[in-house]
Image (cartoon, rainbow, N blue to C red):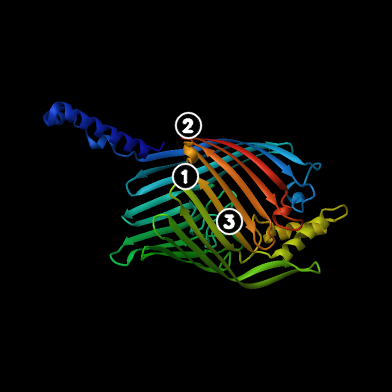
Amino acid sequence: MKAGRWARAACGSVRLAAALAGAWVGSAALAADYSFDLAEIEARPYAFDGFGEARAEHLRLREDAALFPLSFPQGSPRDALNRATAAFEAGGKFTHGIFTAYARASGTAATDETQTTSTGQWLEAGLRASPTQGLVFDLGKQVQRWGKGYAWNPVAFYERPKDPNDPALSREGFVMASADWVKSLPGTLAAVGFTPVLLPVDDELNRDYGAGSHANPGAKLYLLLADTDIDLLWAAKGSRPQRWGLDFSRNLGSQLEVHGEWARSIGATRRTLQPDGKVSSEIRNLDSWLLGARYLTDNEITVLGELYRNGAGYDEAQLARFYGLLDEAFAAGGGQGLQALARSLAQAGYGRANPGRDYAYLRISAKDPFDWLYLTPSLTTIVNLRDSSFQLTPEVVYTGWQNVELRLRAIFTRGREGSEFGEKPASDRLELRLRLYF
């Protein structure tokens, strides 16, 4: 439990004890015997939290799937895989005056029948200064979290993409400088905020953001207008094309929320595999958007739905063409040239988690159904609207023990040959995760 939570709990306990004592011995005795110094329960200048987890997975594999050789390039063919993973995430902060130093790190170690791997990384690490109320400066590795969408964020110009299979997972940030200024106002425009960003890229810094040496400035303007959260976003041309964006979120009553995003990339380069086997590169403006809604029923069932247009994505025929290239490249006698081309196209966009053009997302979750306390079952599906392939994820989470979360879920991918989810290397995945928070 965080230090701040301990402080609030302690404060509540002391106040309750004082009230009971006052009822028993009178106000005079209370003043004499049960007074306390507020300074003794002030929040500490530091905080530390995180979790450790153990995860076991069983995967049923498609040896004949087009994407199988990219995921399992070595070893003999197999139809199943068992994997064990241990992971941790830990973070903390220390505040002194107007300055706060913060950091968060993660690490994983995984083993299966084909390999053993381990990774470690700093997710965030930096220094924050708050010289006055409503104004904050940040320098270091940060995650900006732009956008209102749950599964995807077209306006996340300075972030690594979410994993739609687990959107709440922490993500690694980029080294950048930023500021946040927010001011409350009377009237219809209730608040305004401004967030400038500078993300430098060179041979040593943020190389995976893009190519070249650029400062990559950008900004977000926030408005709380007529009870609607609105962001206007911009990222300058540099390591990536220039981008403009807009997002919004609004509550329509106490149970329904709607949100949306739109982004345009100006002069973006898009590589496409043509029917004759050649690769073309075109420069064009790409528009991406998302529209979603979240509804909470009276019996605490949450329904979340989103429609997503991926402007850089590929239609049904283009994806099928790429999967055909993979089959040819990694078949007997495919040749190193075709394999190199296939890997290059995968890195250029075809190999992304969701490389298609149009998607629908639906998640239904229930809190404590049928009075089953601490149990939250859910069902999630992602559908490629162009080729009708889909992913289905039933899940149940149990939190009945303090600071412990137990999650059991399965992921099923289905689709015909040549479709996105039909060519995934794993047809079924069963996962059990135990997470201990501290």
Name the residue located 35 percent from the left edge and 60 percent from the top edge. 182
Name the residue located 69 percent from the left edge and 56 percent from the top edge. 389
- Determine whether 221 is above or below 134 in the image: below
* Contact? badges 3 and 1 (CB < 8 Å): no
Residue 65, x across and y down, in percent: 77, 51
Residue tagged 2: 401
* Residue 361 tag number: 3
Q: Say if residue 96 shows up in the picture.
A: yes
Task: Give the residue type at disc 2.
Answer: Trp
Instruction: From the viewer's perspective, tell me whether residue 263 is left or right of residue 269.
Output: left
Front label number (1 vs 2): 2
Task: Give the residue type at disc 3.
Answer: Tyr
Residue 335, x across and y down, in percent: 85, 56
Q: Quadrant of the N terminus?
A: top left
* Contact? badges 3 and 2 (CB < 8 Å): no
Residue 60 image-quadrant placement: top right
Few, some or many residues within 10 Å of mark 1 (<14, 14–19, 20+) = some
Residue tagged 1: 103
Task: Give the residue type at disc 1.
Answer: Ala
